[in-house]
Image (cartoon, helix red, strand yellow):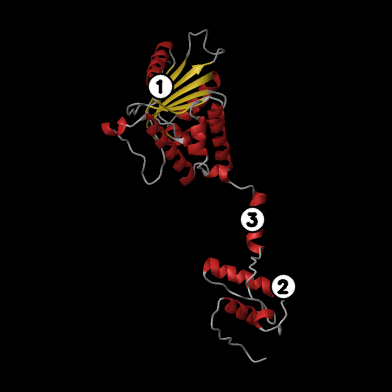
Amino acid sequence: MAHSFITNRDRLLSDIITGILPKSDAVDILVGYFYFSGYAHLADKLADKYLRILVGLDIDTRISNRVREVEELVEWQRIRSKVREEYFNNLVRLINETDNTDTDETIKIFRQFQRKIYDGTLEIRKTEDPCHAKMYLFAYNDSNNENGEQPGDVITGSSNLSYQGLQGRTEINVRFTDKGKYTEGKQIFDELWANAIPIVDENTVDRWKEKVESQIWIDRLFQPYKLYLRVLNEYFDIPSKTNVRTPFDITDGKFFNLKYQTDAIQLALKSIETHNGTIVADVVGLGKSIIASTIAHNLRLRTIVVSPHT
């Protein structure tokens, strides 16, 4: 059959694509929006493919309905670098403010995404004018193209590159396997690509690192051991101020300075400075009244100590 409809009912678009990808060495994708969920769904099969993604409208952020189709002419008269910067900013929000990369698996997929950018096997561009079309072109490798007589497949229809578009909801797409349809689709894509605005390619990697990678949480994660050390330091570190008066100081030597008490005084003063309050609690007989009195003295507060007569 030369073509057939793919509706995500009896057959999933994701299954059709994963069946085509092993026969392909390059993939061109034209979509209205860039959805990381779609890339993630096909990431394993795309790892060794040369991939060009052409975005017609916007990067999907899925945040408070901020994704919108902007079709006013004035919006599309912006300089090309401005368009790139806006896409970088949207991608940063996508990563930082949604759950798209919140698991080890999705972080692994994002690392693959990064590597493909670095090695030049992934390029992203934005169409010069608004474009709502969706088209997937698969260039067959030498083992499957029948000496050029079967150059590849083209799928076109309603599905964006997203989980929903690939399998999560009803869509209408059609697949063409004949040489003429593939060649025509490839020509349309190449013309749009030639006039599109580069977002990510080998010439913009440094800008990508500066505007995206330096701004996302993924590359700012501490190693678990270092985070553990930080927690220990925050919990047990005793701040030291040379001008803090001690029980010995305020009683003219009648009380000795016990380390656990002076540590508690330092910690309490730091807590008051940081959080505007503290609680001194311990078992009977360890000098809570002494600690509290010394804290109050250092704060230059008039103090009333209420305690049982013992």
- Horizontal side of 83 relative to 45 (left or right) equals left
Q: Amino acid at mark 2?
A: Lys
With 135 as the anchor, is 75 left or right in this view? Answer: left
Dot 1: what SS? helix
Mark earlier in primary sequence (2, 1) = 1
In this picture, is 305 found above or below 207? below
Where's residue 104, x and y in %? 58, 42
Residue at the (44%, 25%) spot, across then down: 29
The span from disc 2 to disc 1 (Cα, nearest Å) is 72 Å
Tell me which residue sits at (32%, 27%) in the image.
129
| Vertical relation: 153 (above or below) 249 | above
Name the foreground residue: 245 vs 80: 245
Which residue position holds label 3? Answer: 230
Please name the residue shown 43% across and 39% down the image.
Answer: 89
For the residue marked with disc 3, what is the amino acid? Answer: Arg
Label pair 3/2, CB-CB below 8 angstroms: no
Give the residue at mark 1: 193
Badge 1 density bin: few <14, some 14–19, many ≥20, Cα 10 Å = many
Image quarter of residue 53: top left
Residue tagged 2: 259
